[in-house]
Image: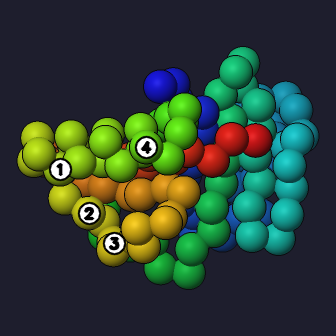
Amino acid sequence: MHIRTIYFKVTDLDPARAFWTNFLGTAPHKDFEGWCEFMVGDIRLALLPLDNVPVGCGCVPVFELPDRTTLRERADQALGLGAKPFFDAPDDASSVVLLDPAGNQFELTDFHE
């Protein structure tokens, strides 16, 4: 398991993109209307625009797992340790978003780019 992506929830993508472009000194390597992403070493730093940033946190680490079996096992492990689902994901989903006991969001995924 490794951290593949960290994304910030933003209410307005344009100024957030401008800030990170200038701060990092590089343009996003992926830039869409609903998402942009910078490479910082081996980690993707992404911006996700949301009209209303949901309760939770504004920064979400995404942990990439090797396969779907591992995804279910690790999600069950986290739930057993006190995590809670952030939202109900279907059983065949390739990712699940959870809240740790302190209320911080994190995502587990078996999606590989």
Among the two numbered marks 4 and 2 on one chain, the one whose residue lies closer to the N terminus: 4
Give coordinates of residue 1: x percent, y percent.
47, 25
Q: Position of residue 33 (x, y in %)?
A: 82, 71
Q: Are marks 2 and 3 in contact (CB under 8 Å)?
A: yes
The residue singled out by tag 2 in the image is: 85
Query: 80 or 12, which lies in front?
Result: 80
Q: Please, what secondary structure does the residue beneath circle 3 have?
A: loop
Find out whether the residues at labels 1 and 2 contact each other: C-beta distance under 8 Å: yes
Question: What amino acid does circle 1 point to?
Answer: Leu
Q: Is 92 above or below relative to 106?
A: below
Residue on which the image places disc 4: 69
Can residue 34 be seen in the rendering of this structure? yes
Residue depth check, mark 1 versus mark 3: number of the one nearer the observer = 1
Q: Earlier in the sequence, mark 3 or mark 4?
A: 4
Image quarter of residue 31: bottom right
User: Residue at label 3?
Assistant: 87
As helix, strand or loop, the secondary structure at mark 2 comes to strand
Whole-number angstrom distance, CA of label 4 to CA of label 2 = 18 Å
